[in-house]
Image: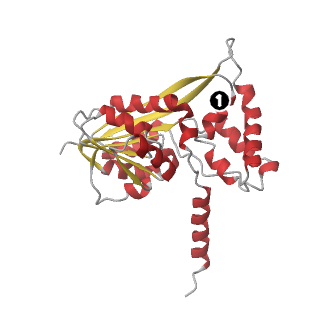
Amino acid sequence: MRPNVETLDSRRQIVSLILRMPNWNSEQYLKFGDERTRPCRDLAARIVVPDARRVIDLGCGPGNSTEVLALRWPDADITGLDSSEAMLETARKSQPESEWLKGDIVEWAGDGGGPRYDVVFANASLQWIPDHATNFPRLLARVAPAGAFAAQLPGNHEGPTHQLMRDIAASASWRRWFPNGKVREWHSSNLAHYYDVLAPHAARLDIWETTYLHIFSAVEDIVEWYKGSGMRPYLEVLDSEPERQRFMAEYLNAIRPLYQPRPDGHVLFPFRRLFMIAYRDAS
């Protein structure tokens, strides 16, 4: 039997999404390892689960966040989950004692029959999954009694650095690559939204935000920063290195007026992040 038109369209949309998903480069991501790991350390330090025995790091990347969890709970069994084999390969080499799983966060969240963890941790990974109103309660449901679901997300999706990426993609010279002016972008909302999503399912909530002020040597460092994270979906759409270099050059020219060097030559790059810890009841 032939599939109907709706089925074919659905399959094409799924294939298109897979082809546009970012391919992660652990070396590029870790160029700013200290800056990317600091929010992870801040989140882990604030989790009040003193005797965690099972901890999972969702979207563990190259394992820098997983290492923080292993130091926080040295007696726990630590698992890292990521969809990128390249990232997992880096993590395995640096931390062979941990368990590493290749998988999708949404699928993992939906596995209601899977094991429970004392801490379900996600550092700068959940912005890549959709429908937080559905998936965040599912993630909390994978937490053991008296445990916690803890997440940190970038909170500057509507800021100028991301808006300029969208503006470039929507411009005439890039329209053939980005016919809708869009790519697979971050999903994020405000803290009040996350309170409403998690409060009905949590015994207690701790929610806050922090703006980190990164001190870079030049505005080019901001391009390098996003090249390893938020710009990946744009670069993956382009099928040649010259086109990727041209996109980054246009982006550099667009952001340069926004980040003028300080008297000592450094550039200040503020980056807002959202934090939330939802605790399960002990019973």
Q: Nearer the viewer, residue 108 or 167?
A: 108
Q: In this view, does 27 lie to the left or right of 48?
A: right
Q: Which of 211 and 262 is in front in this view?
A: 262
Q: What residue type is labelled 1?
A: Asp
Label 1 belongs to which residue? 221
Is residue 247 visible to the viewer in this orientation of the structure? yes
**Residue found at the very far bottom of the displayed protein:** 1
Q: Which residue is drawn at 73% across and 52% down?
A: 240
Which quarter of the image is occupied by the N terminus?
bottom right
Q: Which residue is drawn at 69% across and 11% down?
A: 263
The image shows residue 171, relative to residue 216, as above or below, that is below
The image shows residue 83, relative to residue 152, as above or below, that is below
Residue 17 % position (x, y): 59, 60
Q: In this view, does 122 lie to the left or right of 239?
A: left
Q: In this view, does 31 lie to the left or right of 40?
A: right
Residue 279 % position (x, y): 29, 40
Is residue 84 visible to the viewer in this orientation of the structure? no
Q: Which of 102 and 45 is in front in this view?
A: 102
The image shows residue 35, relative to residue 76, as above or below, that is above
**Residue found at the very far left of the displayed protein:** 283
